[in-house]
Amino acid sequence: MGKFILGVIVTLLVLILGGLGLAMLGFFPTTANVEPPRLERRLAMGAVDASAERRAPRVSNPLTATDPNLEDGMKLYTMNCALCHGGLDRKPSTLANSFYPPPPNLISDPPDDPEWRIFYTIRTGIRYAGMPAWDKSLSEQDMWKITMLLSHIDKLPPGVQEYWKTNFGVEPAAGDEKQEGEKKHDHH
Ligand code: HEC
């Protein structure tokens, strides 16, 4: 029994050190201009989800979904998020395919997660992905306004829809309609 356990430990050590060695010798790819394999994506997404599930506080939005708050959300989104996640003008984001993993288009494919979850992602970012943590550059209020916009994008009040049309020159997002040529982001 003792020998068996020693065998297991030695095997594990060899695997771990071997993996580290290969990494240090440059055998692992570190480029961002390719699409992540399905399995890797699944595993990474699962880990991100589980971590948020365990750590994110179940807070609710302290702000009410008024027209001015939602419109502020649009301005803040445009200034900070559109570059990677696609604009309210529905033109494809310049950087849509330049990250590993690629940023989902949050306008044509808004997250269906609860607000505490969206807020947590915005506030803390996603490690080893291109998603920045915004807690150092946006106020709590502003992060909640963006969260509110994303969770209401399919059910905006008429005044806000009008604001969207006037300022971005297109009809507001209509449900699950997809931008042309865009890949569907698999939600979890
Ligand atoms: C520099 C590029 C970049 C910017 C700017 C950026 N993000 Fe991200 N974001 C990403 C990437 C890349 C991912 C995908 C990470 C992943 O799949 O694990 C992501 C993921 C997300 C997700 C999770 C989506 C999902 O399907 O679970 C949300 C929500 C999000 N971002 C919101 C925002 C908001 C709101 C802003 C603006 C305040 C923003 N991001 C700004 C790159 C960016």
Image: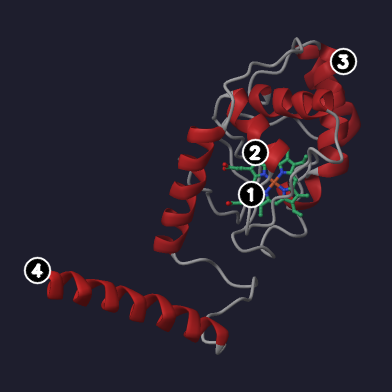
**Which mark's residue is nearer the viewer, 3 or 1?**
1
Question: Is 156 situated above or below 97?
Answer: above
Q: Depth check: give the residue in front, 181 or 139.
A: 139
Does label 1 point to a residue whose CB lies under 8 Å from ligand 1? yes
Q: CA distance from mark 3 to mark 2?
A: 23 Å
Q: Which of labels 2 and 4 is toward the front?
A: 4
Helix, strand or loop status at disc 4: loop
Q: Which of these two is toward me, 128 or 15?
A: 15
Identify whether 16 is placed above or below 72. below
Kindly identify the amino acid type of the residue bearing the numbered disc 2.
Thr
Q: Disc 1 designates what residue? A: 126
Foreground of the two, 24 or 186: 24
Q: Ligand 1 closer than 8 Å to the CB at disc 2? A: yes
> Which residue bears the numbered disc 2?
121
Mark drawn on residue 68 = 3
Q: Residue at x 78, y 21 (%)?
A: 161
Q: CA distance from mark 3 to mark 4?
A: 69 Å
Q: Report the mark closest to the observer, 3 or 2.
A: 2
Q: Which residue is mark 4?
A: 1
Crowding near pointer 3: few (<14 within 10 Å), some, many (20+)?
A: few
Marks 1 & 2, CB-CB < 8 Å contact = yes
Please tell me whether residue 2 is drawn above or below residue 112 in the rendered image: below
- Residue 152 spot, x, y in % from top left: 67, 21
Would you identify the image quadrant in which residue 3 lies?
bottom left
Amino acid type at circle 4 is Met
Q: Which badge, 1 or 2, is on the more N-terminal residue?
A: 2
Kindly indicate the quadrant of the structure image that contains residue 99.
Answer: bottom right
Looking at the image, which is closer to me, 6 or 140?
6
Q: Indicate the quadrant containing the C terminus: top left, top right, bottom left or bottom right.
A: top left
